[in-house]
Amino acid sequence: MADTALVVGGTRFIGRHVVDDLLDNGYEVTIFNRGNHENPFADVEDVSHVEGDRRNDTDLKAAALSVKPDVVIDCVAYYPEDVRVATDVFADVDGYVYISSGSAYGVEEIPKREGETELCACTDEQATDDAHDSYGPRKAEGDREVVAAAEDGVNAMSVRPCIVYGPHDYTERLDYWIDRVLNHDRVVVPGDGQNLWHRAYAEDVASALRIVAEEGEPGEAYNVGDRTLVTMEEMVDLIAEAADTDVEVVRAGERELAAAGLAADDFVLYREYPHVLDTNKLAALGWESTPLVEAMERTVAEHRESDRDGSEHDPGREAEERVLGVLDTL
Amino acid sequence: MTSYDTALFVGGTRFIGRHTVEAFLDAGYDVTTVTRGEHADPFADRERVTNRTGDRTVRGDLKAARDAVEPDVVVDFVGLHPGEVREATDVFADARYVFVSSGSAYVPGDVPMREGVTDLHPCEPDQEDADDAETYGPRKAECDRAVFAAAQRGVEAMAVRPMLVQGPHDYTERFGHWVNRVAEHDEVLVPGDGGSLLHRVYVKDLARALLLVAEEGEPGEAYNAADRSAYSLDRSLELIADGLDTDVTPVHASERELAAHGVEPGAFPLYTPSPMLVSTGKLASLGWESTPPAEYVAETARAHVDAGVTGPEEAPDRGTEEAVIAALRGESDEGDE
């Protein structure tokens, strides 16, 4: 009999890839969510849908009882309480995996490493608010709930992704850069182009979640990110390669940007200090990541079919043109 | 505990070797260094350390040292040409042999660079005996392949690939440049946006890595040696300032802003145009740990100040830096209009 997987959340982005990956690996899959977004698996026979709110304990228990999952992938636990309840409701499963975040790390080290790099602290106030500032602390506290559950014998694990990209990415962060590369010959990259923000290809995050559910050690957290990172400039070049087009990257320093009223962090995916996750622990479980060009080719192909353009992140092409106007390509 | 107690160092009196002698002495070894005698022997008055004059390019010198010392362990600090490593792995075929390679052996590009995954430079036959900087990486890579080939023949030979080595007695003075600037000035000119990421390794940690690989390493394997925690160029300045109990304001200058004064980013010590980061998991799995950067940078900075280190000759001089900084101030004033 096939193993049964319950995906909490799971219709929009990461969860969607999780469902595909589980199906590819022979699982019977049930998705559990409020039904607020269109269900891309509505016509897929092997995927059942249970409607409910994960923040409603009764709903979650009902799902547990009706599905009797072997593994649970929790894509939408944004509060420590969510994790505490879920590890209780799913205390008997073979593997419960909580999607935490690289943001759970509380100090800037390169790379950030499970069990070594300090996590964010989380006050009681932060644990229940929904501010962007408390995202890292809440994710870290969720990780501590996983550790506590494991101490009580629950097969609970955490996975900490960095910036996830790939098909169906509704955050549109990478879409901004893809759109720029597809539609312009010259593109401004802030700073000296060396900026590093570790990214994780969505399909690889999905396989990581399954592998950790199957092979992970209870109470442990596993970083997930591309095995090889690229800088922001290399990312732009990679998009161009994947899209089979050319692009001239124009680097602009702080004063060169300021002349057009721009700052480096007006550009999405720019991060002042490098954010790099160590991925050896996950790799030791047998996980691998998709070659970068292949991952980007699939991302760009799906971008072309979508109506996403990343315009919500656009610092303004006019301002960018002003920067380009005075700067030569180096 | 291993039963090894006799070590022979080929090279080893100036910087890395000097610290490695200390690490081996601490671990109970008797150490013999083989050097040409061109630099003063810092261990002249020390017990359990012997210096022999010899040239590593002369096979007879290596054999004589081997026969006199009968080493359990050989650490080769000065293998710069593949032929030398082929010779050494032959002469020392009965010892545990550790070759000090370099992160430069990798074709740069992968972040991070991993043993057995990231490609090594190819090395053309006519590059093998060259001495220029361009062929350094290819030669070190070919030396590594000589180590692997020796292991295939049954020699217990390993390679260690250090990234940029830092610590007291660093005669390259590359880190010393930044120590000097932070010690002497409030504003320090930094190329790019300060995020330049060149993985470093503290020399005493490297020394312990060489000892560990000598004792525990797998023949035919290479091990990256770099701080478990890397940091940017800007962060280097902060760590130095903290260590010297002072403050620093980095002034970032883009390529164009530097070019206006005839300076290239690459002229600054420790600047890399793309991140140079290695995976350190393999060495760590042998039980190796590294010293927190804040701790060793403070020690290194104080040592460099005490030694009067000012930085490499070829680095930008302070006058030029000040001219760039002054120009940037002027330009930013105009930008505020």
Image (cartoon, grey):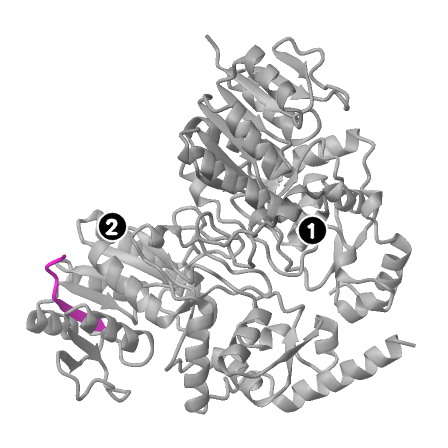
Looking at numbered disc 2 in the image, what kind of residue is underneath it? Answer: Glu
As drawn, A323 above or below B222: below
Quarter of the figure that contains the N terminus of chain B:
bottom left
- Residue at 57 percent across and 74 percent down: it is B238
Residue A294 makes an appearance in the image: no
Label 2 packing within 10 angstroms: few (<14), some (14-19), many (20+): some
**Is residue B9 magenta-colored?**
yes
Q: Is residue B194 left or right of residue A265?
A: left
Q: Position of residue A29 (x, y in %)?
A: 58, 16
**Is residue B19 magenta-colored?**
no
Chain to which mark 2 belongs: B
Residue A133's tag is 1
Q: Which residues are magenta?
A: B1-10
Looking at numbered disc 1 in the image, what kind of residue is underneath it? Answer: Asp
In this view, the residue in front, B124 or A94, is A94
In this view, the residue in front, B254 or A95, is A95
- Label 1 residue SS: helix
Label 1 packing within 10 angstroms: few (<14), some (14-19), many (20+): few
The residue tagged 2 is B218
Q: Which image quarter: residue B3? A: bottom left
